Amino acid sequence: MAYKVTLIPGDGIGPEVAEATVEVLSALKVPIEWDRQELTATIIEQMGSSLPEYVIKSMERTGVGLKGPVTTPIGGGFKSVNVSLRKQLDLFANVRPVFTLPGLKTRFEDVNIDMVIFRENTEDLYSGLEHEVVKDVVESLKIITRYASIRIARYAFEYSRANHRKKVTAVHKANIMKLSDGLFIRCCREIAAEYPEIAYNELIVDNASMQLVMRPETFDVLLLPNLYGDIVSDLAAGLVGGLGVVPGANMGEKCAVFEAVHGSAPDIAGGGLANPTALMSSAILMLRHLGETEAANRFQRALSETFRQAKYLTRDVGGTAHTAEFTQAVIGNL
Ligand code: NAI
């Protein structure tokens, strides 16, 4: 029986990286029946909804999605598709493994980085509760609940236990936001106490950012509220080669969406220059979620080997190859 998976290629470089990823999955012969759903900035503008009903319906049918980026207007226009998707499908955990790819030239290439970042995905300053109090004074509400904090903390600790991770670091700013981040950190401590085999520590977000740059190899699992998680996970991506190479997963109780964390890269869209590694790595996470461990391992080995050979890398990571050449190299290494 084939797995049913919703494919949202997105726009900009989305369709290029989606096509490349689907090609490798098909070479792997994992039986997947794609439920392809078009979602682009133009469609969203025409329909007047950042998350049309057909996308939600498809996700409810399949429970699993593979998603490319969708352009979001900045400082106005429609709401981010990703934020809407996470809210509507209650994808409460954003999971980002960040690890060194052998052969990839980065500022930290001599350091073995291997961390997993867990970001609460549904509240905090992303609640969308903003209003103008009086002219030229705007208020944005930061919402932190015990329910969401406990849920993400438990998810991170359960993952750590299942994957033999040794340390969870909770990141906060409770010295300033004593009530909101204070609640988050109390929930983390409460859950940490249930997992005595896993070490637990806390870092204030500014210090955590510095430590990540100075000693990235000392981090194992990070646990953060939404906004810090958003910023720190991109910082961590920068340690291992940037947004073009790191995967992401948005996990809920009923649905999971695997997506490249980079945007639609309008500056290079349509030129065959996109690096599909991030979406390919997200597809590897998807295979693990589906229980296709052997296929996931093969895909990961082929991807790592392609980087180690460094013959067909794309421009963003110092190579000259086009998306299609990189993809063929990965398939050749399967
Ligand atoms: P971006 O990630 O699209 O691009 C930043 C830089 O990285 C650009 O120079 C781009 O060429 C490069 N880049 C990104 N991904 C790459 C890849 N796979 N291969 C090679 N180079 C790559 O970020 P930007 O420019 O801030 O956003 C562009 C649009 O994407 C915006 O409308 C933004 O809202 C949207 N966006 C969508 C996301 C999503 O749907 N998941 C996530 C982030 C941004």
Image (cartoon, rainbow, N blue to C red):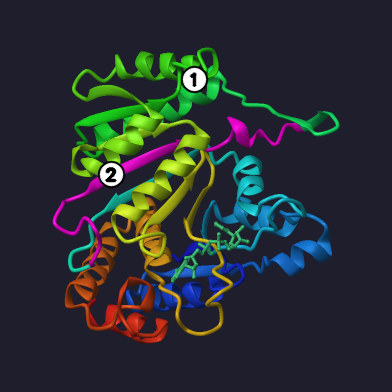
Residue highlighted by disc 2: 213
Give the quadrant of the N terminus: bottom left
Task: Look at the image and tell me whether residue 55 can be seen.
Answer: yes
Stretch in magenta: 105-130
Percent from the top left, x then y, of residue 328?
33, 85
Question: Position of 205 compared to 16: left or right?
Answer: left
Secondary structure of residue under mark 1: helix
Task: Look at the image and tell me whether residue 159 can be seen.
Answer: no
Q: Is residue 102 above or below residue 274?
A: above
Q: Is residue 104 above or below residue 190?
A: below
Find residue 206 and report its image quarter: top left
Q: Magenta stretch: residue 109 in it?
A: yes
Q: Magenta stretch: residue 56 in it?
A: no
The residue at 33%/33% (across/down) is 208
Find residue 170 and report its image quarter: top left
Decide which of tag 2 and tag 1 comes sooner along the chain.
Answer: 1
The residue at 23%/72% (across/down) is 307
Q: Is residue 186 above or below residue 169?
A: above
How many residues crowd around disc 2 within 10 Å: few (fewer than 14), some, or many (20 or more)?
some
| Amino acid type, callout 2 | Val
Mark 2 vs mark 1, CA separation in Å: 23 Å
The residue at 36%/53% (across/down) is 237
Farthest residue in the right direction? 135
Residue highlighted by disc 1: 181
